[in-house]
Amino acid sequence: MHTCEQSIFIEGVWEPALSGSTLAVKSPADGETFNVISKGAKPEVDRAVAAARKALSGTWGTLAGFERGRVMCKLSALILENCVELAELEARDTGKPISQARTDIQSTARYFEFYAGAADKILGDVIPFLDGYQVMVHREPRGVCGMIIPWNYPASMFGRTIGPALATGNTVVLKPAEDASMSCIYLTKLAHEAGVPPGVLNLVTGLGEEAGAALSQHPGVDFLSFTGSSEVGTIIQTAAAMNHVPCVLELGGKSPQIVFADSDFERAAQTIVNVITQNAGQTCSAGSRVLVQQSIYDPFVELLKSKMSNVRVGAPSADLQCGPVINKTQQLKVQGFLDRAHTDGIEVLAQGSMDESAGPTGYFVRPTLLGPVPTTHELAQQEIFGPVLAVITFEDEAEAIAIANGTNYGLVAGVWTENGARQMRVAKKLRVGQVFINNYGAGGGIELPFGGVKRSGHGREKGLEALKEYTVTKTIVQKHD
Ligand code: ADP
C-alpha cells in the first residue's frame, strides 16, 4: 500500500490536509510506523459537509432506489474481490488475527449487499383519516450524515453506517478513528470505483478532538452516528443537542453471560472464552462478566480455566485466537485493571499464553480469567475493552437478573440454560438491546437490530431497523373533496 498523505476524500478528489500535517499509522503487533494519514481538521470538515450538502440535490437525490442498490451491489462485489488485501491491511492496522480480519471484510461486503436489497423497499404508509382526506407518510433521507467510528472494527463499521445511509439516499461525511483509518480509505476508493457519485461519500481522517469535534458540531450536518466510548458519546450528544439534530450512539457495554446449572457446560464455556478473546476483547458487545450459578461454580469454572489457558496470543500473521490490543494506552489501561484487581486480592484463575510471534514492542496482553469478583468491584462494573473476564456468582434466577441489570450499561446479554421457560422469562427481564440464548454473537449478525439502553447508548444500527434511523417521515395530508 502506498503512503496516504492524501487520505482526505472530498467531492471525488483525494487531498492532503490544508495544514500539510500527517499522523503516523502504527502496527499494534510491533509498534512500528508503517504509513501516515492526513491530519484533517475543521477546514476539511467544512468543505466535506458542503460537498455532501451539494450532492444531496445532485444525481444521488434523484436516483431511484434500485439504482442506488446497484451501485451498492457493485461495491459489495469489489470488497469481496479485494478481500485478501483489505484483510491484510485491517490486520496490520488493528492487530487482529488475519482470519478475524477476513471475517470482518466479509461482513463489510454483506452490509452493502443487505442494504442494497433494501434500497428499493423504503416503504411509506397510508393512514385512514377523515372523509375527504388522503394521508400519506413518506420516508425521506435525513440529509447529510456525520459518521464517527472507532478503531475496533473499522471496515465493518464502515459497512454498518454507510450501508443504510446510502441505501436511504443520504450523503455522508465519515471520520474514521485515528488509530485505524486504513481500511476506510481503501473502502472509500472502492466506493468511488463502484460509482458512488462525488460528494456522496466524503472521508476526513484526523483526530477525534479536531476533525471529529468539527464534524459533530457542524451546523450543516443533519444526523450523527457515533460508535465509541460513553465519555465521547456524551460529547457527541451534547454537540447534537446544540444543533438540534438526532444522533445514534453505540457506546460501551459490560455484557453478562448468565450460566445456569442446567446449561450445556462445554458449549457455554467455549463460546464465552471465544467471545472475550475475539478482537482481544475490544468489542463493545463482548461478554465480559460471566455470572455462574453457585451450585456449579467449581466444575464450570474449571472448564473456563482450561479454555482460557488454551488461548494463545500472537501477531496477526500467526493467526491465533487473540492478537494485541490497539495501542500502548489501551495496553496500559488493561494492565491497570489487572494490577488493581491484584491489589484488591482478586484471584487470577487462568491466563492465556504468549506465542513467540508476540514480540516485546507489540501491545500484547495475556487473556485473563479472574474471580470470584464482588458485584461492586470495577471489574464487574466498568468496561475494560480487553481480554479480561470476571467471574461472578449467583444463587437463583432473581439474583442473576438483578446482577445482570446492575451496571450502568445495557447492550447485550447471554443466557445459558436448557430450561425453555426460564430462557424467555430471563430474556424478557434483561435491560439490554440483544439477548442471545445458548449462543452469543459479538459483532456479527448484519440482519439483527443492535444497540443499547442506559449508558450503552440509544438508537439502532443493523438490520432493517437501521433504515428507520437514517430516514425521517413526512406526513402529507390532502383534502380532496
Ligand atoms: P475509543 O475509546 O474506542 O478510542 P473514542 O470514543 O475515544 O473510542 O473514539 C471513537 C471515535 O470518536 C474516534 O473516531 C475518535 O477519533 C472520535 N472522537 C474522539 N474524541 C472525540 C471528540 N471530542 N469529538 C468527536 N469525535 C471524537
Image (cartoon, rainbow, N blue to C red):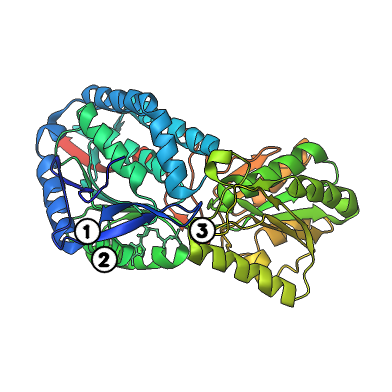
List x then y, in percent, for residue 185: 29, 43
Q: CA distance from mark 3 to mark 2?
A: 22 Å
Q: Is residue 48 left or right of residue 22?
A: left
Q: Secondary structure at mark 2?
A: helix
Q: Is residue 463 visible?
A: no
Q: Residues within 10 Å of mark 3 (few under 14, many from 20)?
A: many
List x then y, in percent, for residue 146: 27, 52
Q: Quadrant of ligand 1?
A: bottom left
Instruction: Determine the residue positioned at 31% across, 37% down.
Output: 187
Instruction: Determine the residue positioned at 75% across, 66% down.
Output: 373
Q: Residues within 10 Å of mark 1 (few under 14, many from 20)?
A: many
Q: Residues within 10 Å of mark 2 (few under 14, many from 20)?
A: some
Q: How many marks?
A: 3
Quick check: 389 above or below 166?
A: below
- The residue identified by callout 3 is 252
Q: Is residue 67 visible?
A: yes
Q: CA distance from mark 1 to mark 2?
A: 8 Å
Q: Are marks 1 and 2 in contact (CB under 8 Å)?
A: yes
Q: Say which of marks 1 and 3 sits in front.
A: 1
Instruction: Determine the residue positioned at 58% across, 62% down.
Output: 384
- The residue identified by callout 1 is 40
- The residue identified by callout 2 is 210
